[in-house]
Image (tube, rainbow, N blue to C red):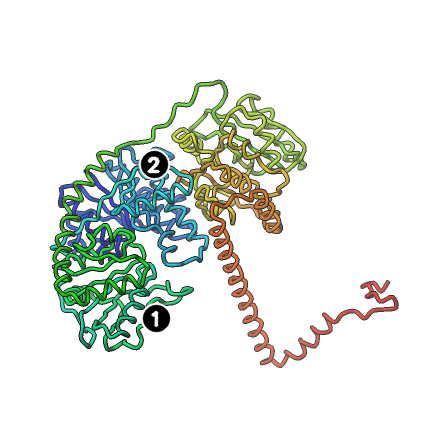
């Protein structure tokens, strides 16, 4: 089979947990005779022979958002990707473009993405909306979603980019053909997340990570480095200093044991995180708890070289990994491969890896008393430690033997070959799509907009041109001309008194013959395949209420890109804070639109955001075709900029008041809004600081010239208030 693993993290270029898995899986699949490709971030020189030797027979491709010409990405699209607001969006788009290139050359049989960082979001959306990657099974391998990791770490700050990333990760899981998890616990959690979001989870299977025990033991050869002084068995922790990994529990437990005089030594090794109390250093928190014993019985260190880590594991009597919840950590696999007695928390995948009391010991996760009791018993029982360590090595060989894991994955791929074929719409009279074009005094842009409609590759549409009471003579002449040119059937002009954008759209929708409607402003432009793509997406999934595309900005010529926007569909919590759902030009199901009440005609801007709030609150879904097929014209005097900016607070408040039950998790929506408010105030303080610094420099310059006192005196005269006259009122400039 032709297998492609997609991940920004790949060992040896990136040695974190996901990277180690991808490297192991790629090698195992290549050794089993499969053609293996890896799509990853541009990690320096991917062709370095030393690094390439670590992935024999594996083809490694860089997904570089700054260089997409090699995969045939058109210049306007590549430039739009460069305008992506957040790096994880740009990287996921680059992965998508590289995959399309690979699949076009020779079709892939299996493509796998991690849910973490949403590397597969755009490729999976492309599959669901356009039928791309035909013949390939598209799987999502679960590691630990960002939302779960943050909850376990007690990280409650939720800014807009993190909320977007969480939405993209969740959608990636929903859109997969199959979810593959190394443990049942994580698979159950992913299903619960999807169900709570109102989605039906795809099929899921448990397949452990591949792990080459012999190679791991060889790689972990080396001396242990410096160890703590004193007597007693050696307890080792290695991994990040992170709350979810229970390092604070281990520190507190070790302190109590040492205070009671229980003989033991402790070494903790790893990188720091800011998952301590209220975002503080967790390593410093651990050091503070163990301070009386640092330098004697205890060492708390940063990361050690891998060779020293192997020596440290061989010296250990107990490896303690006391996570509150863990997926399928390499630290445990490596410790078991070295024949160590392991102590782990009983929540998550670690309790599924070891057999409690046989190949390791588990304790009640998060319970410091249970951990203390478990450690104290093992510290006093050397024969039991030895027996558990021997069984641990045998267990990891049975569970994670690479060839067996590849065989199980091959069976999963064969069992999930599927595709979403478009539904065949019912034959009926009339067009499939009604394009609604509201028009008010935009004579200079309308011809470009109409030309983009005429150029559509999908032709089963009608155009309803709604004049919303234009007042400018040139616009009235343009309407008269179009009325003469239009055929009165496929192309019609409708006239109404001025009522605003929402009113014009509703008027057009009321006259629409199709159940699929497309609002299109009279200054924007569609790429030729826009209708073909969004109608195709609706046919593939008729339950959708809305389908949009990625957006690129322009001022005069659509090919001269000045910016981009990457909407993500309906996230009910994020919609409470701002519109990341879609722009106004989306294909809408008319029956769903009317169910939501249509456009609010009292709003002078943001009426599309209001509509999407209504659709999301009713449980409807929206997908975004991952192509830049809509071109949004930037006009300084547009309604969004004149009304949407100056009165934004009033508009947003009105919209939210209309949808009181919108948030699925109100705490999540409030946390996003708090982060937005703090970020805005921080920007204001920076700007104020800049202004003050400029004023200080100006004062210094004037003081140096001896002019400061004179200018201050003139300024005080200019701003002195008028003296009240007889009736107590200030005199007017004319003295009347």
Q: Dot 1: within a 10 Å radius of its alpha carbon, few (fewer than 14), some, or many (20 or more) residues?
A: some
**Residue name at image x 53 percent, y 61 percent:** 681
Task: Name the residue beneath numbered marker 1.
Answer: 284
Q: Nearer the viewer, residue 515 or 675?
A: 675
Q: Position of residue 116 (x, y in %)?
A: 33, 50
Answer above or below: position of 239 versus 102: below
Above or below for 285 versus 5: below
Tell me the SS state at disc 1: helix
**Mark 1 in CB contact with mark 2 (< 8 angstroms):** no
Residue 364's disc is: none
Cα–Cα span, label 1 and label 2: 46 Å
Q: Name the spot of residue 675 as percent of width and height, x first.
A: 49, 57
Q: Could you say where residue 124 lies in the image, as x and y percent from the top left? A: 34, 40
Is residue 403 at all visible to an observer of this figure?
A: yes
Picture quadrant of residue 174: top left
Residue 22 visible, this angle: no
Eyeballing the image, is 368 above or below 712? Answer: above
Side of 222 relative to 545 (left or right): left
Q: Which residue, given by chain and number where applicable, does mark 2 sit on?
A: 127
Q: Residue at the location (30% across, 36% down)?
A: 133
What residue occupies the far right of the structure in this picture?
Answer: 726
Query: Callout 2: helix, strand or loop?
Result: helix
Along the polypeptide, which appears first: circle 1 or circle 2? 2
Snapshot quadrant of residue 569: top left
**257, 505: nearer the viewer:** 257
């Amino acid at each position: 089979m032709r297998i492609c693993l997609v991940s920004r993290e790949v060992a040896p270029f990136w040695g974190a947990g996901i990277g180690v898995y991808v490297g192991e899986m790629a090698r195992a699949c290549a050794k089993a005779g499969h053609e293996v490709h890896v799509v990853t971030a541009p990690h320096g020189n991917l062709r370095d022979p030393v690094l390439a030797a670590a992935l024999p027979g594996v083809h490694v491709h860089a997904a570089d958002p700054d260089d997409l010409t090699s995969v045939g990405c058109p210049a306007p699209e590549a430039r739009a990707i460069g305008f992506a607001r957040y790096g994880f969006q740009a990287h996921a788009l680059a992965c998508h473009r590289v995959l399309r290139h690979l699949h076009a050359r020779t079709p892939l049989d299996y493509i796998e993405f991690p849910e973490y960082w949403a590397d597969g979001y755009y490729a999976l959306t492309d599959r669901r909306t356009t039928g791309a990657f035909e013949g390939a099974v598209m799987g999502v391998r679960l590691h630990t979603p960002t939302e779960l990791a943050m909850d376990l770490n007690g990280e409650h700050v939720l800014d807009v980019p993190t909320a977007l990333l969480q939405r993209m990760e969740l959608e990636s899981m929903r859109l997969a053909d199959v979810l593959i998890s190394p443990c049942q616990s994580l698979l159950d959690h992913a299903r619960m997340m999807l169900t709570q979001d109102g989605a039906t989870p795809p099929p899921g299977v448990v397949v452990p990570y591949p792990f080459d025990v012999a190679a791991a033991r060889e790689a972990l050869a080396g001396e242990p480095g410096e160890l703590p002084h004193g007597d007693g068995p050696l307890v080792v922790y290695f991994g990040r200093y992170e709350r979810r990994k229970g390092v604070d529990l281990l520190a507190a437990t070790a302190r109590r044991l040492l205070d009671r005089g229980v003989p033991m030594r402790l070494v903790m090794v790893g990188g720091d995180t800011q998952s301590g109390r209220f975002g503080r250093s967790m390593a410093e928190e651990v050091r503070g708890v163990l301070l009386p014993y640092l330098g004697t019985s205890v060492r708390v260190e940063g990361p050690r070289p891998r060779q020293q880590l192997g020596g440290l594991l061989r010296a250990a009597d107990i490896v303690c990994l006391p996570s509150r919840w863990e997926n399928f950590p390499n630290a445990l696999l490596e410790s078991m491969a070295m024949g160590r007695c392991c102590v782990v928390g009983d929540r998550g995948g670690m309790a599924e890896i070891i057999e409690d009391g046989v190949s390791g010991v588990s304790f009640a996760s998060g319970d410091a008393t249970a951990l203390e009791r478990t450690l104290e018993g093992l510290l006093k029982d050397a024969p039991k430690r030895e027996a558990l360590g021997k069984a641990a090595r045998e267990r990891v060989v049975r569970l994670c033997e690479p060839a067996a894991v590849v065989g199980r994955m091959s069976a999963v791929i064969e069992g999930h070959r599927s595709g979403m074929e478009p539904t065949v719409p019912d034959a009926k009279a009339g067009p499939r799509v009604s394009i609604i074009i509201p028009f008010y005094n935009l004579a200079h842009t309308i011809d470009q907009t109409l030309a983009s409609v005429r150029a559509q590759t999908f032709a089963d549409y009608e155009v309803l041109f709604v004049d919303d009471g234009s007042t400018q003579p040139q616009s009235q002449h343009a309407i008269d001309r179009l009325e003469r040119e239009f055929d009165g059937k496929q192309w019609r002009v409708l006239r109404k008194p001025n009522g605003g954008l929402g009113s014009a759209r509703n008027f057009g929708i009321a006259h629409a013959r199709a159940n699929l409607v497309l609002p299109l402003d009279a200054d924007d432009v569609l790429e030729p395949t826009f209708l073909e793509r969004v109608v195709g997406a609706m046919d593939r999934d008729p339950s959708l209420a809305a389908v949009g595309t990625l957006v690129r900005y322009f001022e005069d010529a659509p090919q001269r890109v000045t910016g981009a926007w990457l909407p993500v569909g309906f996230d009910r919590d994020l919609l409470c804070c701002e519109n990341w759902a879609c722009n106004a030009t989306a294909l809408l199901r008319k029956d769903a639109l009317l169910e939501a009440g249509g456009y609010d005609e009292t709003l002078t801007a943001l009426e599309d955001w209001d509509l999407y709030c209504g659709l999301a609150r009713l449980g409807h879904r929206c997908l975004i075709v991952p192509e830049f097929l809509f071109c949004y014209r930037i006009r300084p005097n547009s309604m969004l900029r004149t009304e949407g900016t100056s009165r934004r607070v009033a508009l947003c408040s009105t919209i939210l008041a209309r949808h009181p039950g919108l948030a699925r998790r109100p705490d999540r929506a409030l946390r996003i809004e708090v982060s937005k408010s703090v970020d805005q105030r921080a920007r204001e303080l920076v700007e104020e600081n800049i202004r003050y610094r400029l004023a200080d420099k100006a004062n210094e310059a004037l003081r140096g010239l001896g002019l400061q006192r004179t200018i201050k005196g003139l300024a005080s005269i200019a701003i002195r208030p008028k003296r009240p006259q007889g009736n107590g009122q200030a005199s007017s400039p004319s003295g009347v």
